[in-house]
Image (cartoon, rainbow, N blue to C red):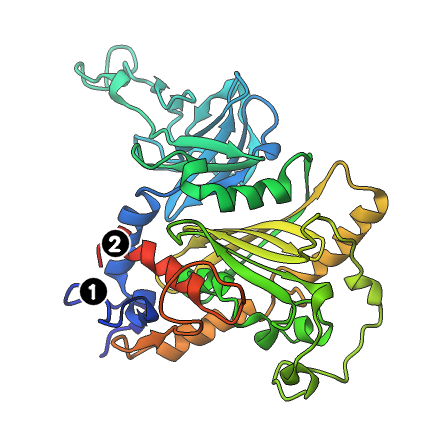
Amino acid sequence: MSADPATVTLRQPLRWPSEGLSRIPVRIYSDAQVYRDEQDLLFRGPTWNYLGLAHEIPGEGDFLTSRIGDTPVVMMRAADGSVRALVNRCAHKGSLICYEPQGHSAHARLVCPYHNWIYDLDGKCLSVAFEKGIQGRGGMPEDFDRSQVTLRVLRVEVLHGLVFATFSDSVAPLRDYLGPEMLHHVERTLGGRTLKVLARYSHIMPNNWKLYIENSRDTYHPSLLHSFFATFKLNRLSADGGVQHDADSRHHLVFAKRHTDVGSAEYSSGTLRAMKTDYGLEDPSLIDQWIEFPDQITNSIQSLFPGFVLQQILNSIGTRQTHPIGVDKCELIWTLLGFEEDTPEQAEIRLKQSNLVGPHGFVSMEDGAIGGFVQRGVAGDPDIHALVEMGGRGVGTADNRATETSVRGFYKFYRELLHV
């Protein structure tokens, strides 16, 4: 019986094609050893990983559960107002401590539901149930030292309400890790306003986590794959736009200005497969918008290595988290945002435009399927390579979106971390 291609383990070390960043060995989407290496060297390595919104844990003891790669993490609000993040795993038997997505823990303590071991927010074990036994019998050994029992505490930084954490003691501070270009866009999108969560939903995607991250950085596909984008002129390659990177091309920003679209031969001829010239909207107000930012950008996708996305689709602002679930599945979590400062009319527009994104969104539902098409398409032949040469073979900022520079940029840093 042949092995399941979704769980193949490498018989030899992974070697990147000699062509470099313009080729991707497709075995990285299905190889079990590569997946394990990613957990150790990437997610638990020198990277900053998004956990959630500080806004959602306003009071002492409030918590939100998340993951960094496969590792469960809980973030909590401490008595001093700071945000803490700890590995959500009891030191006793490895049980989850906080098992609900969100909640409140009295007295800012973490209590394991299995055997009632109790920890503080510095990870210190405060109590072991029946540590001394019962009436002098049983209990922990005499040399048991509870002070040596701790939870793993992570470094945390908060940026305009976004909470990031890292396992690394050596990675640069978050703002340096992002660089001025990426930092500016986060500040531009979220700064100076009070966040309000409008909705959250998630779905399981039938593909390796990297295929979704590639998709979020693929500036070539939106007006080809997403018929809604092209048909209603929300995002076309013929509009002004471009791609920005940080200095190391770890992170990515693609942007477009909808109102500058002057058309092109490809769109006006109707020859593009994605173009549907005979479609209309029953309610055109769905795509009404106001120009929200002075730069007049109407669409932007910012992807921060490894798995965080900050979106602006017209006036729909939101975050996306990508969590791996084994080699051939991942969870994508969407959080749609409004702001306390929004007028009632602006709030209504944001709610309407929430129909554009998400698992069933008019301009997002295809993304939930296309990664699975790739996963299935490359199965059984792990030695082939994907070709990513659109826009050249290097990395860096581009003044157009007919390019795969950001996919190559992702794998530049990926290869450094995994030593391949």
Which residue is disc 2 drawn over? Answer: 418
Question: At x 81% / y 73%, what residue is drawn?
Answer: 281
Q: Residue furthest left?
A: 12
Q: Which amino acid type corresponds to the residue marked 1 in the rendered image? A: Leu
In depth, the one of 263 and 42 nearer the eye is: 263
- Specify whether residue 326 is in view: no
Q: Would residue 296 be found to the left or right of residue 394 on screen?
A: right
Question: At x 28% / y 57%, what residue is drawn?
Answer: 415
In depth, the one of 367 and 96 nearer the eye is: 367
Measuring from the top left, give residue 297's x and y in whole percent: 66, 55
Measuring from the top left, give residue 123's x and y in whole percent: 37, 24
Which residue is disc 1 drawn over? Answer: 14
Question: At x 25% / y 68%, what residue is drawn?
Answer: 8
Helix, strand or loop at label 1? It is loop
**296 lies above or below 377:** above
* Image-quadrant location for residue 53: top right
Q: Which amino acid type corresponds to the residue marked 2 in the rendered image? A: Leu
* Image-quadrant location for residue 187: top right
**291 lies above or below 123:** below
CB under 8 Å between callouts 2 and 1?
yes
- Specify whether residue 300 is in view: yes
Q: Residue furthest front?
A: 399
Q: Count neighbours of disc 1 (C-alpha within 10 A) and say few if under 14, some if 14 to 19, many if 20 or more.
A: some
